[in-house]
Amino acid sequence: MQIAKKLSEIREILSDLEKNNSKINLIPTMGNIHEGHLSLLKEANKFEGINVVSVFINPTQFNDIKDFENYPNTFDQDVNLLSKNNCEIIFAPNIHEMYPNGLETKKTIFEYRDILCDAFRPGHFDGVTTVVNLLLDIIKPSNVFFGEKDFQQLKIVEKLIIQNKLKANLVKCSSIRGLNGMSLSSRYTKLSMKEKTQFDKCAQIIDKNLLDLINSFDIKILENIKKELQSIGISTIDYCEVREESNLEISKTNIHSRLFVAFYVNKIRIIDNFVLY
């Protein structure tokens, strides 16, 4: 496995691959590798090509500097895990390599905005599209892999690829869920034991009401989820909504729709979505 930390290094590696007409499968990550990330690698194994995992904690997608500073950085552990899971190249640049002219973002995607996470994390998706565009330009992959946990992000990245007429094929991968039924996230390693217990209670509330939503859509169920979360001490709920998969508009049916939730367990933001059909 090769590790490139500079643009010059990754470009040299990619130049050699290009000479051999090798295809590239890119899995963009911010590190703290878990089973969700590894599932993307497993999906990549189904495609022809060399597996490249980028590990870069992108500062421009954090709207809170403390959130950026507290984001888990476990690079040595990540290298060990990736080396055992058919990752052939790690691209792990520093901030200067990715932003040589200083931190800057551009708002280029205007669909799927001002709703869900975009309404609560100003500038977040501008940072996401900026860094994804940079990675796609540097790596020039045949396939790029994203999980459905961040479904709004997935839709925005899909629009980015279409709008910019990029050649990368976006491969959408199902969420990998923990024992409590919630999608895995690097942030959850920061939960204390007390917070994990509260998180599990939240998961039980969502799961119980999710079954009701799947069986028969009723807007009152969403209010019930909020009330039950508040009853166990969840004071900040960003959203609890049912939206259509195709356009992320508010839905009044469970057909081709998902439940979207975002709330805080103490200072840890929890986001997830659930298929309702």
Image (cartoon, helix red, strand yellow):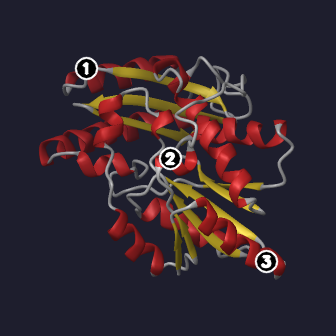
3D distance between C-alphas at marks 2 and 1 = 38 Å
Q: Which residue is mark 1?
A: 235
Seen from the viewer's position, the closer of residues 213 and 35 is: 35
Q: CA distance from mark 3 to mark 1?
A: 51 Å
Q: Is disc 3 surrounded by few (<14), some (14 to 19) or many (20+) residues within 10 Å?
A: some
Q: Nearer the viewer, mark 2 or mark 1?
A: 2
Please, what is the three-letter code of the amino acid marked with disc 3? Ser
In percent of the image, x 43 and y 49: which residue is there?
183
Q: Residues within 10 Å of mark 2 (few under 14, many from 20)?
A: few
Where does the image place residue 137, in percent across and percent down from the top left? 73, 51
Point out which mark residue 96 bears: 2
Q: Nearer the viewer, residue 131 or 100?
A: 100
- Which residue is more in the foreground, 175 or 130? 130
- Left or right, 10 with respect to 19, comes to left
Under mark 1, the amino acid is Ser
Foreground residue, 212 or 5?
Answer: 5
| Whether residue 58 can be seen here | yes
Residue 251 lies, with reference to residue 204, above or below; the image says above
- So how many labels did they put on this image? 3
Please name the residue shown 76% across and 36% down the image: 159
x, y (%) of residue 171?
70, 56
Q: Quadrant of residue 155?
A: top right
Q: Is residue 177 above or below residue 220?
A: below
Horizontal relation, residue 237 to residue 55: left or right = left
Q: CA distance from mark 2 to mark 3?
A: 28 Å
List the residue tagged with mark 3. Answer: 22
In percent of width and height, residue 239 lies at 45, 22
